[in-house]
Amino acid sequence: MGPASQHRSIHVYAGAAAIAWTAVALLSFVLYARLAHQGVLALAAAQARASFQKDLAYRRWVTARGGVYVPVSERSPPNPHLHAIERDITTPSGRQLTLVNPAYMTRQVLEDERARGGSPGRITSDAPMRPENAPDEWESRAIVKLRSGATEVVEEVDRDHPVLRYMGRLLGEDRCAGCHPDVRPGEVRGGISTQVELPEYFAVADAQIEQVGAAHAIVWALGLIGISGGAVRARRRVGEREREREARDALEQELAHARRLEALGRLAGGVAHDLNNLLSPILGNAELALERLPPGELRQDLEDIREAAERARLLTQQLLAFGRKQVLSVEPIDPSETIEALAPMLRRLVGDAVELRTELAGGLPAVRADRAQLGAALLNLAANARDAMPGGGVLRFATGLEEVGEERAGRVGIAPGPHVSITVSDTGQGIDEATRTRLFEPFFTTKPAGNGLGLASAHGTVRQLGGGIEVESVSGGGATFRVLLPAVAEAPAVRAAPPGPAPRGTETVLLAEDEPSVRRYAASVLSALGYHVLSAEGGEEALRLAGHHVGEIHALVSDLRMPRLGGPELRERLAAQRPGIATVFMTGYAGDSLGPARAAPDGTIVLPKPVTPADLAVAVRRVLDARARATTTPAPGDQPPSAASRSCADSHSA
């Protein structure tokens, strides 16, 4: 359809819209007038209902107390229908009082209300004991409806002028038997009727209808103006439609790209799990063999194997970091102290041609992070900055505290509030707009020898810690990467001491691992460290071994993900038989087993694969020592530990 045809269509649609709008305005006004009448009736019914509830509340109050005493008067003589022992009493001062029952009181209250000009109301029954309580024609019909199951009767009655009549039911109670022996509890005895004069209500409604009618006329006129303006804008939109279609196509491509990245993240986790299972025996057995071999050609071959396995280990860690599925040991840390400790490694990484400057603020709040993984992310950012300055330059690390507002938080993808910032800026070539939009894509790189995982893994690590990365850059003007991590009110954890010799032990360890090569390797490491190892190829066999083992089992070393019975379920069932068992979980990918919102159970360590002999030795010794401290309380008069036990403890604490 050409522009001329589109303009003709717009004129036709605008005319049809004007006619339809006029019809809608008229219909709306008519419907409002009808609803206003219904609203008047509903309001009057609400007033009548409230009056009835008030009278019923007074009646219940009197019923609950068996009546009230009032002075005897011409208007309030003793009730001849009330058979009570103390119906009439004389006060010490000589006043004559008579007992007024609920119906007597309600009738007088309603008479007083009518005398003051209030809503006319009366108590009535189809079998009244007093002639003045006899129902009129409408009340008789209403009582019949109440006896048929209705809880209330509301009708508009048009006599000389419109009136709304209302009747609510009165039910028999146990206390009514004093005056009405034939009344059964729960039986409808009659009701309290009220009538509301409607002319005043209708007068208010008519005034509102006039105002709404004027408002409808204004809205109708504004609608016609809007239709005309819309027609003008529609003609303008004809030229913009193609641009909108192109923008929509771009958004669809971006969404498809995001879905591909999510699928790639899931794939990365699965691949990393299998790779880590393969790398554990390769890396571990290579280290064990290197400890036993003298220098020579065979030793060089093993060192090459270990180096290749280490590179593969780094690659799997980057894959997991990109997919945000790595196992993190999160603790409160001081970001400035972390960068200060990282400075020597940063200087070696960037080389002599790049000047490293640090501007680290003191007294910053802590952030909850994995010290090693955060350091690896910062090293990746530093390596990226170094590559952007091939001829040398300045690399600056700075820390500070920033309050992130709603708009900025939404742009970065973090929660608003106080954040600690780690700024990494360089004086290099800068980043053009096309590259900046793809910076954190996995396997995207502008470097001939790059694998495209450095920035992707850094971004994944920061996102997994609840933070985000801002990027500011112009081509030729350097780049600034700002890491924002949520500030916490916890004190920073003390850095662990450098590891010493692999700690040993003599306790019994139950090993559960479904991968044979990993199981043999882990059993070999633990046996070499002096532990008595019970080796099982899965969770179910581990339970059987534990059930047949007579002695104590001090620790469980288990793969996190195993067929039929995984590590967490195995530990839970073992803990029921052997409370407080120390546990080390090994995993190549913890995402499917623990989940992003679940932490490792208390008293356990999650050890990411590939597991080195030193990692396994330290983790097992740590959980065993923690278990010993938790279960052993020195008693007064105990003998001090022997020299041999002190020596063993010293070696364990290394």
Image: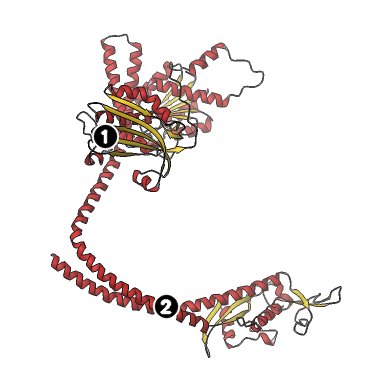
Query: Which tag is nearer the camera, tag 1 or tag 2?
Result: 1
**Residue ID for mark 2:** 211
Residue 251 in percent (x, y) is at 25, 50
Report crowding for label 1: few under 14, some 14 to 19, many 20 or more residues within 10 A (C-alpha): many
Closer to the chain start, of discs 1 and 2, is 2
Q: Give the residue type that dot 1 points to.
A: Gly
Front-lying residue, 401 or 10: 401
Looking at the rendered structure, the secondary structure element under dot 2 is helix
Does the image show residue 77? yes
Looking at the rendered structure, the secondary structure element under dot 1 is loop
Quarter assignment of residue 223: bottom left
The N terminus is located in which quarter? bottom left
Report crowding for label 2: few under 14, some 14 to 19, many 20 or more residues within 10 A (C-alpha): few
Q: Which mark is residue 478?
A: 1
Q: How many marks?
A: 2
Residue 91 in percent (x, y) is at 84, 74
Q: Give the residue type that dot 2 points to.
A: Gln
Q: With 649 as the anchor, is 535 left or right in this view? A: left
